[in-house]
């Protein structure tokens, strides 16, 4: 068993309104910054023991499916690195 | 001018309590998942025009300093990709 870190990034699906990101973008513009778009996402870094990276990715994927992401409005991706 | 995407990841500094991450970890454990730690972070993907990647990174860094991160409790990093 080795220790892995699985990074799950959870984003809103295209077309789902993100008022928080819109507000952040406007606040940056009020500070004088020039930007064309801003998207926000949640990132979870999960340390877990697994026999290999594939098993770690599979378990992180299941965590995203069952709890971290809401499949109606979110997309997610999983990246695994060995510690 | 080219279009770049700057990704700013904002994390709590080591030692700052993260009750939301702790609650998420416990919820995953209640679902039967085995994990040794979970950290949460905010991720902002910012589309902006700049002359080169260095300028894009510098501007994203300034956005993080001034608005996206709270230097008392947060660390952040910036990664830039050309679109």
Image: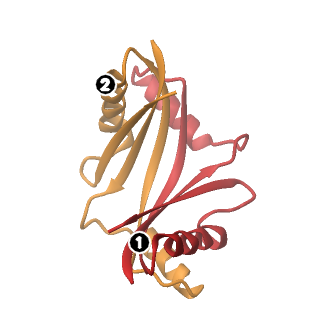
Chain colours: A orange, B red
**Whole-percent x and y of residue B60?**
54, 70
Tell how many labels.
2
Instruction: Determine the image quadrant of residue A6.
Output: top left
Numbered tag placed on residue A19 in the rendering: 1
Which of the two residues, B53 or A30, is positioned nearer the viewer here?
Answer: B53
Q: Where is residue A23 in the image (x, y as percent from the top left)?
A: 48, 76
Q: Which of B22 and A9 is in front in this view?
A: A9
- Give the chain letter at badge 2: A
The chain letter under disc 1 is: A
Mark 1 neighbour density, 10 Å: few (under 14) some (14–19) many (20 or more): few
Q: Looking at the picture, does residue B24 appear above or below residue A56?
A: below
Q: Where is residue A55 in the image (x, y as percent from the top left)?
A: 33, 21
Direction from residue A54 to residue A29 in the image, left or right: right
Q: Distance between the residues labelled 1 and 2?
A: 36 Å
- Residue at mark 2: A54
Instruction: Answer above or below: position of B27 versus A35.
Output: above
User: x, y percentage for residue A54?
Assistant: 31, 24
Q: What element carries label 2?
A: helix
Which residue is drawn at the image coordinates 35% and 55% (left, top)? A11
Q: In front: mark 1 or mark 2?
A: 2
Nearer-the-camera pick, B11 or B2: B2
> Element type at marker 1?
helix
Q: Do the residues labelled 1 and 2 touch (CB within 8 Å)?
A: no
Disc 2 crowd rating (10 Å Cα; few below 14, some 14-19, many 20+) is few
In the image, are marks 1 and 2 on the same chain?
yes
Asked if A42 appears above or below A21 in the picture, the reply is above
């Amino acid at each position: 068993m080795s220790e892995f870190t699985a990074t799950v990034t959870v984003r809103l699906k295209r077309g789902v309104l993100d008022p928080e990101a819109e507000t952040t973008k406007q606040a940056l513009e009020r500070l004088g910054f020039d930007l064309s778009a801003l998207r926000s996402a949640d990132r979870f870094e999960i340390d877990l023991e697994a026999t290999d990276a594939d098993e770690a990715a599979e378990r992180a994927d299941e965590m995203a499916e069952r709890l971290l992401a809401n499949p109606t409005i979110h997309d997610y991706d999983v990246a695994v690195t060995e510690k």
